[in-house]
Image (tube, rainbow, N blue to C red):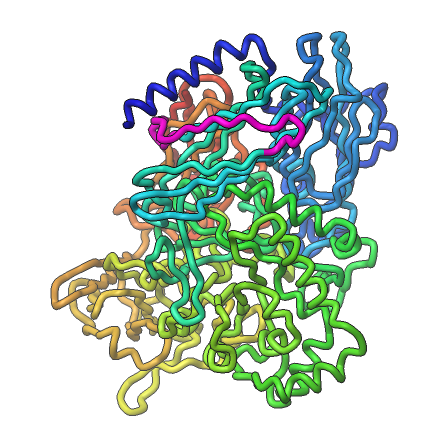
Amino acid sequence: MRLFYLLLSILSVFSSCTNNNEGISRVIEDFNYDWRFYLGDEPEASKLSFNDTNWTVLNVPHDWSIEEGYQKEGETAASSGFVPGGIGWYRKSFLLTEADKNKQISIQFDGVYNNSTVWINGKLLGTRPNGYISFIYDLTPHLKYDGTPNTIAVKVDHSAYVDSRWYTGSGIYRNVKLIKTGLLHIDHWGVQITTPKVSKELAEINIKTILKNAGEINDKEITLDYFIVDENNVAVARQRETIDNKSFSDEVTIQMNTPKLWSIETPNLYTLKVEVYQDDVLVDDVSETFGIRTFKFDANTGFSLNGKHMKIKGVNLHHDAGAVGAAVPKSIWEYRMKKLKSIGTNAIRFAHNPHSPELLEVCDELGLLVMNEAFDEWSEPKAKSKVYLGDNAASKEASKAYPEVFNEWAERDLKDLIRRDFNHPSVFMWSIGNEIEWTYPHYSETFNEVNPNSSAAGYQYVPVYDAKKIAPVFEKNIDSIDPLVTIAKKLVKWVKEEDDTRPTVCGSVLPSIGMVSGYGTAMDVYGFNYRQADYDIAHQTYPDLKILGSENWGTYSEWKEVIDRDFVAGIFAWTGFAYMGEAGPWPRKGLNISFFDFAGFKTPRGHFFETLWKKEPKVYMVTTPNSESEFSYTEKDGWKFEMQLTPPPVWNMLRLWEWYKVYPKWNYKNDEAIIVQAYTNCEEAELFLNGTSLGKQKLADVVEDDHILKWLVPYTDGELKIIGYNNGIKADEYSLTSQKEISKIEITTNKTTIDADGYDVAVIEVKLLDQKGTLITDNDTKITFSIEGEGKNIGVDNGWEMNTQPHKTNEIITHNGKAVLYVQSTKNNGNINIKALVYDKNIENEVTVVSN
């Protein structure tokens, strides 16, 4: 049978090649190169005659905010990362020939932040306020084919520089494509694939195809040829359909024997190719990658994928990536997602807006589920300030945001998101909003009145869920129909009009009120943000409610609340990677309350969650001087550690968002009292100082509800080692060693070979080491990078949330002895030699990456 399908595939490819000479098939051109850019307003720049020869020539994706760098004063805000916004212009000229006539020619932008306006040859194409959504314009009526240039002009208006609660970036920060098709062609995002029936023996692949005809309607026969190939490009199914040349749509079901299912462990992918023929002449073709899987949410048993029960081990993720800002190459997303997978993460929540198509491709390829989220705000804005948690509020003009256009654009933006991302097997939920209740005061007022001993921020308070007590108070606090419920139902309706195969969800902060108002019942699954205290009472009150932790602290107590309850589907911890914004005061540009820092180095919290989320034996430790630690060592019913009420820097809540103040080192004053924290999933662990045992502890005996082993150790120069045991047998070990003088630089790369495509990136890590190879954490110094060959520097970083050094430079001061350099290929083959140098000590090292 496979041989038969292989022959069909070969014949189809041959047919495509021969017919391509007669018809007009689809061409997608990379439109990222050779744009001209100007930061500032140029009112005449939309005109074809405008002279842009003095503008900067660059390639997109491009984020001017990260290039301008961090600025304490002026038009910047802690909320959005202390970077400027402003107005910027982009222009690009291109040629068309007579051969391009009788084609439909469009331009696709995958993301422009924000308020973009686009012209072609001086003709206005349109405006798109949403900075996260992908969109397309038809250029055909305004083009020239006589050898004179066509010019695209794009105005980006991010003058409302604090229009978000976090870093957004500015500019054409995602990919741009020029799409050429025949007049009869498959519509933009016009192929939708579902798998309504799936078993080990058989899968039914349902395909809906929408055609568009920009020419005259005629009587030519229209035929659609569908064929599916696996990851080895072997054909596994094929079907051919003749359609009504007036309906311009088709729906077909193809059966596939013994399908390979897409899962977390084995993310098997298939490719569907749809070819359009007019009287046997190929006129268009589209390829779509998809996966075959089933999933289910259950009010009692939680979540299952392909019939197998599993806990969602998710993280929230913003769309920026440290040194590159919002203009993130796919290979950096791949680097980051592999790191998250390495600690047991199996799901990502796109917080709180549409992310790039490339990130979705990576999640498809690696096996990561995606909660795809549309909005952080609806018609009412959330508070934004120049100094987070301060009183220096941004001006009305500076904080204008999406709520001003929500009523006009929400339906189109939401539906475009679903159409764009429909075929990604990683997407398993559509989220319509995040913490929207905060923008409608009657929700908080009702909660506070019904729960007088708490407040709307009482995250660990078990609230009243009795509808008889809540309903009259809610009705008293609102004098009309609840706008939140009205909008929620409208958004859910729009989702279902596009996709009825995936559930809807929201991130709710007041679920007890939402279940009475109708907000919670509007969704298929109810997401609880920081409301683990509600799980039991919500399940008891509403036994049919499907509950998911949609935003959660990265703490053991949070995870334990989930693993002890089958009915809770899982969590999405805040956050997977450190992100810019939502921080302050200066120089705190962002929040490193994450599993990995800005540069991609695993944090202590990441190590801790690895011990919770993975079965492989692991032990890890960090240290803190007793004088700085939140823990105190007291004699009470025997020696034990207890928490002191030392508030963290952000949100005066003890170690929920913030992690403990710990250091990954063994380097202190002689005899200084040091508290050692050990994270492990082993049954017990034993601590050694210079070979002498300091005692063995069992994880099951930990008194505090934090899953952490602790020792009080007087500092002594040498080696601190911890060994984890299972069934009395050594399972893993980890050590920290006292540091000496910097003696060498370790330089490594995540890839020794990258593609010479102008996009692929190698991540170069450097570490400061002493003569014995111990990481030097206490003597950070400046490293200078040099690159020779077919590569370019697109950013440097050290991972620190207080790091406000420029990223677009060849120098960086390390943090905790570490830094990274991102090297991107050119389009030429050859070696890339990267050298790291500490000038004042004349220490250097180098690594070579091959670009081909």
Above or below, 418 against 90 in this view is below
Total marks drawn? 0
Which residue is nearer to you in this view: 434 or 47? 434
Q: Is residue 411 depicted above or below 140 in this figure? A: below
User: Is residue 176 toward the left or the right of residue 17 in the image?
Assistant: right
Question: Residue 356: which quarter of the image?
Answer: top right
> The C terminus appears in which quarter of the rendering?
top left
Q: Is residue 297 magenta?
A: no
Q: Farthest residue to the right: give it.
A: 44
In terms of depth relative to the viewer, which is nearer, 10 or 584? Answer: 10
Q: Is residue 735 left or right of residue 150?
A: left
* Residue 249 x/y as whole percent: 61, 33
**In the image shown, does 391 or 736 lie closer to the viewer?**
391
Vertical arrangement, residue 169 with respect to residue 605, above or below: above
Question: From the image, which quarter does the N terminus lie in?
Answer: top left
Residue 778 visible in the picture = no
Question: In the figure, 443 relative to 824: above or below?
Answer: below
Magenta span covers which residues?
229-249
In the displayed structure, does residue 188 sit left or right of residue 702? right
Residue at the far bottom: name it: 637
Image x and y of residue 731, in percent:
18, 59
- The residue shown at (22%, 74%) is 697
From the top left corner, tell me how far across and down residue 635 is, in percent: 31, 88
Spot occupied by residue 653 in the image (x, y as percentages of width and height): 54, 75
Taking the image as drawn, is residue 453 in sight? yes
Residue at the image point whose x is 34% and y is 59% from the top: 610
Identity of the residue drawn at 75% across and 45% down: 129
Q: Is residue 238 shown in magenta? A: yes
Residue in the picture at 71% in, 67% down: 484
